[in-house]
Image (spheres, grey):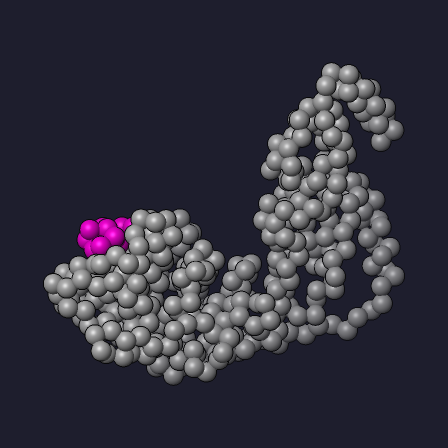
Amino acid sequence: MIRKFAFRSLMFRLFLLSICLSSLPVQAAKITPAPPQVAARAYIVMDADTGKVIMASREDERFPPASLTKMMTSYILEGELTKGNISKNDMVPVSVKAWRAPGSRMFIQEGTQVLLSDLLKGIIIQSGNDASVAVAEYIAGSEAAFADMMNQHAALLGMKNSHFMNATGLPAEDHYSSAYDLALLAQAIIQKYPEQYGVYSEKYFTYNKIRQPNRNKLLWRDDSVDGLKTGHTDAAGYCLVASAKRDGMRLITVVMGTSSEEARAQESQKLLAYAFRYFRTHKLYDAGQVLETAKVWAGQQNQLKVGLENAMAITIPRGEGEQLQAVLDLDKVIKAPIEKGQSFGSLKVMLEDKVVAEAPVIALESIAEAGLLQRIWDAIALFFYNLIN
């Protein structure tokens, strides 16, 4: 339950809040158990909607990402599709380099052309190194040029501990990422390109009469899991980025450097079970929702609707939602002209004495300045209003 306070005097608000708290019945303390022990070199659990890190270990350290690299390859491919720069119906030529790519393969043939939509599935479902090289060459002209694109996108996403040298994740010097960065990348894939996201949950893909399964075992074990990608090299160990959605809450987990295929699945299940059981995401306000109607001076209309530019949600331990309080602080005087999107205060969501979310409060509409007579009248009224207040 969210209680909204719109008092403009800080001292009065604190005084009233102290009275309210003193009258509340004493509640039993909410106990959240310690996180489970996770047998991985690094791991993280992130809420996909809020970006809240629920639990993590060595999440900012740099490690070889193996085929988790292909998440960036598919992210760029999905972005180019969304922009209309390429089409799923494009026929992509297969070079000798792509055909000879070692490791996991889609089994495309040199000198042939392959549907781009098939290559997307080959990258995500079959973890095809050959498909990744073919796509990189098609989009950027060469794999080296594509790696430069990968690093530019990583910088835009805030992936501060990532650097890519190729599109596949095959071992290379100065090729690394972190659990946190990979969670950010997974979040971007889910949020920016939902129309493409369904591919990550497909269990099988057949190309060239060769049927291969998705290496993400959680797709068979947990119906709430719908992505994203596995990876393995001797240096990286067994890695998995997974995402699951239950009761409207979506989580992203990353485990890096586990000991086996089975271990990466089990450790990911541990993280999902703990986070879903003991945490909850509360969606508080929608983007553009009217939070308050404020008085406007010297405008062609005297009321202004204000709200948030973006939706607001928070992730907190279960059972603490009733303790949330929202404090809306608006400017004391709002004068026209007003442009839509202009900021006139802030909204803070408090849990006990901590701010757990904060966002600027903006005008949801534009209001033009009133005529001369109305402006004069409002100036006089505002003078006396300021004297009284």
Q: Is residue 41 left or right of residue 249?
A: left
Could you tell whether 235 is left or right of 197 in the image? Answer: left
The structure residue drawn at horizontal position 14% and vertical position 64%, both measured from the top left corner, is: 112
- Does the rendering let one see residue 67? no
Q: Position of residue 51 (x, y in %)?
A: 53, 59
**Going 34% across and 77% down the picture, which residue do you hit?**
204
Q: Position of residue 303 (x, y in %)?
A: 75, 35
Placement of the C terminus among the 4 image quadrants? top right
Between 36 and 73, the one lying in front of the other is 73
The magenta segment: 137-150
Quarter-of-image position of residue 262? bottom left
Give the quadrant of residue 376: top right
- On the image, the x and y values in percent for residue 276 come to 57, 73
Q: Is residue 113 visible?
A: yes
Q: Residue at x 77, y 45 (%)?
A: 6
Question: Of 89 and 275, which appears nearest the observer?
Answer: 89
Q: Main secondary structure of the magenta part?
A: helix
Compared across the picture, whether 215 is left or right of 55 comes to: left
Between 327 and 174, the one lying in front of the other is: 327
> Does the stretch in magenta take in 195?
no
Q: In the displayed structure, does residue 240 sit left or right of residue 135?
A: right
Residue 60: x percent and y percent? 42, 61
Residue at image x 85%, y 67%?
25
Up-down: is 308 above or below 336? below
Q: Does the magenta segment cover residue 143?
A: yes
Quarter occupied by residue 127: bottom left
Residue 75 or 263: which is nearer the viewer?
75
